[in-house]
Amino acid sequence: MAAALPLSPISHQLCRSSFRFLNNATTPRFCSPVFSVSPSLIGVTGIGSASQLRARHRLIYSAAATDWFLHDVGATVAVVGGAYALVFSFESLTKRNVIPQNLSRKLVHILSGLLFVISWPIFSASTEARYFAAFVPLVNGLRLVVNGLSVSPNSTLIKSVTREGRPEELLKGPLFYVIALLVSVVFFWRDSPTGMISLAMMCGGDGIADIMGRKFGSEKIPYNPRKSWAGSISMFIFGFFISIGLLYYYSSLGYLHMNWETTFTRVAIVSLVATVVESLPITDQLDDNVSVPLATILAAYISFGY
């Protein structure tokens, strides 16, 4: 029965070096990029007895496990630090009245989610990497809960990410936003366009729609006077291009393999569905940070099939 695990470049080189040193033999194929050991290989490769092979297997497995663990811990610390730096920067700008509260809130809405998605490739190729990445929104979610329940209220945080400056608001839109990030990273990760597009529409599309709607939204949508044509059109256009940008980014890194002849049409359909859902007069019943990602996930999953 074979055992398999992913090797980082460092562990891959360790595997190659170990077998050269211990056996003075050609590096076995199972050192790259996933190495697996089967008892049947012992007689074929001539790399030593079963006990020797098991000892080397344990050595390499331990080195590889330590490598990806430290890698992902470092990546998690870096992304958490970046997330806090981003929010702190806008908290400071809002506190000093450099930018208005509404603009600060929307810029945090747009940038924090998109930068989080862009950071996924810095995590390792291990199966557990997504859970390390999920720690980032989890920490932010706990922070929102603590402040929203007024256990330890942070006035600058409340001012920078809420509409009316009330602590309980943190338990609505901002918390739903963090939950959407958590769902995308755990259930879809880097090898599925579904999570990427859902966050592109929620963070970029919906965020920019609010900014453009406030500035140019004099012409309202007939069935929802709280939404404007300028906002909805902006959401569709920016959501579409941000989605395409993320898909291209992950395709260029080898995580996705897209058929671009059909991808543009599929993303346009998903963007249209998300835009229509966002324009519906249901905000009082269902927050945009819930309705938009749910609609996008469903449409993207049907469109792309994974």
Image (tube, rainbow, N blue to C red):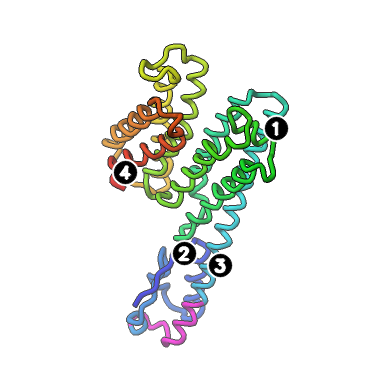
Single out the mark in the foreground, 4 or 2.
4
Single out the mark in the foreground, 3 or 1.
1
Question: Taking 223 as reference, is 154 left or right?
Answer: right
What residue lies at 37% left-to-right and 32% top-to-bottom?
Answer: 274
Question: Taking 53 as reference, is 165 left or right?
Answer: right
The alpha-carbon separation of the residues under discs 4 and 3 comes to 35 Å
On residue 7, the disc is 2
Magenta span of residues: 44-58
Main SS, magenta region, reads: helix
- Looking at numbered disc 1 in the image, what kind of residue is underneath it? Ser
How many dots with numbers?
4
Label located before the other in sequence (1 or 2): 2
The alpha-carbon separation of the residues under discs 3 and 2 comes to 11 Å
Label located before the other in sequence (3 or 1): 3
- Looking at numbered disc 2 in the image, what kind of residue is underneath it? Leu
The alpha-carbon separation of the residues under discs 1 and 4 comes to 39 Å
Local secondary structure at mark 4: helix
What residue lies at 62% left-to-right and 52% top-to-bottom?
Answer: 77
Disc 4 marks which residue? Answer: 301
Q: Residues within 10 Å of mark 4 (few under 14, many from 20)?
A: some
Local secondary structure at mark 3: helix
Disc 1 marks which residue? Answer: 92
